[in-house]
Image: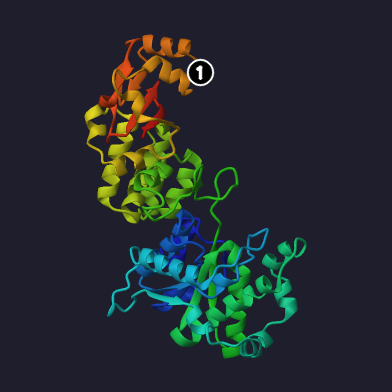
Amino acid sequence: MTFIQELQARGLVQDIMPGTEELLKKGMTAAYIGFDPTAESLHVGSLLPITLLMRLQAAGHKPYALVGGATGMIGDPSGKSAERNLLDNETIEKNCAGIRKQLSKFIDFSEGKPNAAVMVNNYDWFKNFSFLDFIRDAGKLVTVNYMMAKDSVKKRLESGLSFTEFSYQLIQGYDFLHLYQQHNVQLQMGGADQWGNITTGTELIRKKCAGDAYAFTSPLITKADGSKFGKSEGGNIWLDAELTSPYQFYQFWLKLPDAEAEKMALIFSFKTVEEIKTLIAQHQTAPHLRALQKALAEELTIMVHSAADLAFAQKAADILFGNSAIEDLKALSEKQLLEIMDGLPQVNCPKSILENNGTELLSFLAENNIYSSKGEARKALQANAVSINKQKISAIDYKLTAGNLLNEKYILFQKGKKDYTLGIFA
């Protein structure tokens, strides 16, 4: 399959300009995708453009990653219902540096490689570009009628669209023109909501250089309920291990509903389409085993983090949901323990209650709402349904002491199979 045919088989092409596939067949093509520096880290939603650049490079083409140091100061109205807060120079520079570091994990920037990836920042060519120069060199080439016809503009007119955001498509279009002139970049890729901005760039290239430029977009990734993909109950799933631990990242993919997992496997996995379809068919015969989710979670955790991080994520899952023993919990550092327990309900208590003869477990469970009453807690203990640090407790008169503490501060309470509460004693 050609590069475009491969993407189409994965459902990754929505709009495409005529001649794009023919351009890519001719030989190495320089193509770019823009990244918005609104945060210091990219998130799961950014994985699609990242993997597009990876696939492009693997097919022998030259990827350009554009970090929007200039456009990040303005804000793209595409897909937005309100104007974004503008960022200052210091924040944008910090965010751009973080994104550069992350992208280097996915695409090859090695010097001397014919199709080595290149990273550019549009602030470099806009910082000394005066407003008068811009409206003379770029503004005169695109009519207001042309700009008003874009969906990204139409959808915002009723709620209000500032001139700052209105100008965004012209500035992004100029990025394409600059890369075309300075780096022979002939193709821009992006999400479906970027089609209007991208085609403004091809229009500028046609009028300014009498040149041919091309584009294609990928469908926006959404969950089965239509909501934005890449978020969990705790917010964005980041690619930075300090913001989202490898364990939480692994769990995000592991918990995908079956229908989403089938779609995401085609989008993100680097297995062949045939291999993925075989895996989907196997999964459908025994969905309770979650083989598809596990395969995707393993592949992406290694890609974004490392094989060692995957091994820890799997060990962590076994600690919470498998048959691990208290020794496994005791072997964890405080950082590892908190990574695993991230998102669990917590109770905070003074450490002094564990001193001397300790505190009665039955009362503790009721007073901290782990159970609704002492009567309910008593029944659970009698039914052998309560565990402390993965050890079953059935004694009604059991007392919590400092000897129960993990890392001298924590106790893990469990009722039933998967209902946990982390006690923090300080």
- Quadrant containing the C terminus is top left
Q: Position of residue 206 (x, y in %)?
A: 60, 85
Give the camera-side residue of 107 and 362. Answer: 362
In this picture, residue 96 sits left or right of residue 172 = left
Reading the image, the residue beneath label 1 is 372
| Left or right: residue 27 compared with residue 22 | left
| SS at circle 1 | loop
Residue 314 horizontal side relative to residue 212, left or right: left
Three-letter code, disc 1? Ser
- Residue plotted at (26% across, 29% down): 324
The spot of residue 207 in percent (x, y) is 62, 87
Q: Residue at x 45, y 84 (%)?
A: 184
Of the pair 408 and 129, the residue shown nearer to us: 408
Q: Is residue 33 visible?
A: no
State whether residue 197 is above or below residue 312: below
Quadrant in which residue 111 is drawn? bottom left
